Image: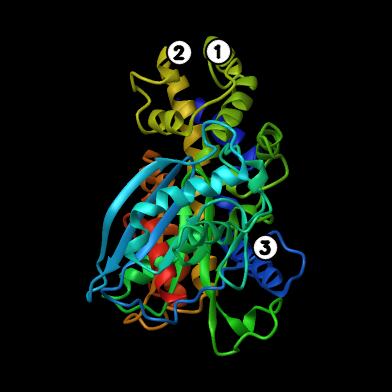
Amino acid sequence: MVQMNTRIDDFLRTNGFDEHTRDSGRLLAGFAAEMAAGLAGEPSSLPMIPAYLSVDRPVPADKPVIVLDAGGTNLRVGVVQFDAAGTPHISRFSRHKMPGATAPISADDFFNTLADLLMPVVDAAETIGFCFSYPAEITPDGDGRLLRWSKQIQAPEVEGRMVGAEVVQRLAARGHKRRITVLNDTVAALLAGKSAGMARRYSTYAGYILGTGTNTAYVAPNSAIGKLKGLDPNGHMIINIESGGFGLAPRSRLDEIFDATTLDPGTYAFEKMISGGYLGGLGLTVIKAAASEGILSEAVGAAIQGWCTLENKDLDDFCDNPFIATGPFAALPLTDDDRRAIQALGGAVYRRAAWLAAVNLASVILAGDGGHDPLYPVCVNVDGSTFYRTKSVEFRSRLEAHLRKILEPRGVSYELVGVEDAPVIGAAVAGLTR
């Protein structure tokens, strides 16, 4: 067993997964530099997209707002109202298939379908908050221009169109004049934290998603957003960082090999190192490389070399319990050394992901320049299955330990919260406060 552990340690060190060489300070500096460049409109791997929303306005109590949440292949519609304590109340809620999720659809049919789904609740309020979780350019008037579809939506004619204005036009044609505010899911996560702050006072807010993909948002002073002219220098604006594209994280040879197998090689390198949509595939690349060096038994190594994919859940389940009786590993003739090796190799992928995610989150908290008084910490609303459900290497606890190690010596107080139905609640806050 000692010899096997030594071989695994040597393999991980040679391939850039050695924990002892990680430099959080250097990575923090890289994030800060890329964020500053993106805000200035200079070349950067972080686009720092203005949301044209702020947290400066209070959320009105007892005022309803219509909410439309388009994310993945599902679309949700409802009405939200906050009470005096800041507790959201969701009513008249319905869930539908996203238009274009199962078959191609024209632009007219797409927007008419959205209007149809809003009709049962259109009488509830004058404003609509629209959480639109696809790549979109947000405009100063609170609309969003679809840049491209993701998540296999088949509605190509919609690309390039202003999604909010198209919906408003169709509602107006039916006799209902409404105002709409478009935002993305990470900004919605931040604003959902703002709703939690109605009962607990915070210095500033951030939103963090670590699920199939990853992203972060925070509140920047207008004076720091050099690429936008004419802003009130005393004001603030939420910035969608698009942190999955961060380009300065140290990548290994195996990251590059895995990246070449993805549908979009060369893009969103950071996301491919930490998020659930990629950790299984990256882990498989690491395991195959180890097998090619004879670290696994011949039979198991040959079998795994034939695998084309590996789901994150299956890798996580095995690393958490190498004797699990379900999943693809259960069909292999594993020896105890095989189990030790695969658990160690997969665990190295998750440990690195926890560290990288913590540095990302710490960078965003520090950029917001809040939390200097423990009475008013930074509120970080965290959403996403990878953060909450990854079991191996005590992922969440490890991430939080890295975060404490970075922020506590700097005297920064923060609180990680989890707001249920964050896209819906955040969209409601946007609709009520714009």
Q: Residue type at mark 2? A: Leu
Q: Are marks 1 and 2 in contact (CB under 8 Å)?
A: yes
- Of 343 and 304, nearer the camera is 304
19 and 40: which is toward the camera: 40
Say if 113 sits above or below 263 in the image: below
The residue under the point 28% across, 67% down is 81
Expressed as whole percent of the image width and height from the top left, the position of residue 227 reads 71, 76
Q: Callout 3: helix, strand or loop?
A: loop
- Circles 2 and 3: CB distance less than 8 Å? no
Q: Secondary structure at mark 2?
A: loop
Earlier sequence position, callout 1 versus callout 3: 3
- Residue 332: which numbered mark, if any? 2
Look at the image and tell me whether residue 43 can be seen. yes
Q: Indicate the position of residue 423 as horizontal and vertical percent values.
A: 41, 56
Position of residue 404 in the picture relative to residue 288 (left or right): left
Residue type pointed to by label 1? Ala
Marks 1 and 3, how far apart in space? 42 Å
- Mark 3: few, some, or many residues within 10 Å (few <14, many ≥20)? many
Say which of 24 and 129 sits in front. Answer: 129
User: How far is mark 2 from mark 3, CA to CA?
Assistant: 44 Å
Pointer 3 residue: 47
Mark 2 crowdedness (10 Å alpha carbons): few <14, some 14-19, many ≥20: few
Q: Which residue is mark 1?
A: 303
Residue 16: image x %, image y %? 64, 43
Seen in the picture, residue 26 relative to 350 is either above or below; the reply is below
Q: Mark 2 or mark 3: which comes first in sequence? A: 3
